[in-house]
Amino acid sequence: MIKLCNLVLIISSIMLINVQIYAQNVGIGANTFTPNNNNVDKFDFDFVDQPDLAQTFAVTCCLKNVQFHFKGVQSLKIKETDRVAALIHELAKAGYILHEPAEGELAWKGQRCDITAPISIATYEDHRMAMAFAPIALLQPINIENPQVVSKSYPGFWNDIDSISKKTGSL
């Protein structure tokens, strides 16, 4: 299910469609992703039951210019890396200023900063960092360091991204 959700978000970004997210906070199986013509202005969600998806949502929200406030991300600090700190640091390289309003929270209020160098995203040997940042390539050149780290959970990730990009003409 996590692989499918990552691909759904990446596909939605690749196709540059708007995604309305019906999140009922009752588990990922209850969420429905529906392409439509409506813009989502802000996305608030408690990721306590599916924290591993927060990275992909954070990057996608920034790319779609959707402000967010996530709760329930405290366990991200004890994964392969401190994913909250990593998101804050790496998204700043792409021009997005995130902050941690309280323990277990991550937010973006639309603040931007100048990009001062070519973007090179550190993965911290974390497969989810590599997968979450892939959609940035839709908007600007990017280097993802140690891209083979995705083999931990999704060995065919880059092949699938390449296949999708060939079908849509993106990337």
Image (spheres, rainbow, N blue to C red):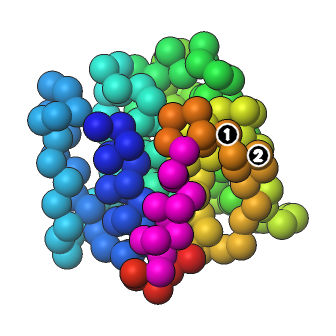
Left-right relation of 44 to 23 = right
**Relative height, residue 145 to residue 34 (above, below):** above
Q: Residue at x 61, y 69 (%)?
A: 137
CA gap, disc 2 and disc 1: 6 Å
Q: Main secondary structure of the magenta part?
A: helix
Q: Quadrant of residue 76?
A: top right
Left-right relation of 64 to 158 = left
Where residue 27 appears, x then y in whole percent?
Answer: 20, 27
**Relative height, residue 60 to residue 89 (above, below):** below
Q: Tell how many labels.
A: 2
- Check disc 2 and report the residue beneath it: 146
Q: Is 132 part of what is drawn in magenta?
A: no
**Answer yes or no: do the residues labelled 2 and 1 have beta carbons within 8 Å?**
yes
In the image shown, does 29 or 76 lie closer to the viewer?
29
Q: Residue at x 15, y 25 (%)?
A: 26
Q: Quadrant of residue 98?
A: top right
- Check disc 1 and report the residue beneath it: 149
**Could one spot residue 13 in this view of the protein?**
yes
Which amino acid, mark 1?
Val
Left-right relation of 51 to 42 = right
Label 1, secondary structure: give it.
Answer: helix
Magenta stretch, residue numbers: 155-166
Which residue is situated farthest in the bottom direction here? 169
Q: Residues within 10 Å of mark 1 (few under 14, many from 20)?
A: some
Label 2, secondary structure: give it.
Answer: loop
The quarter of the rendered structure image containing the C terminus is bottom right
Which amino acid, mark 2?
Asn
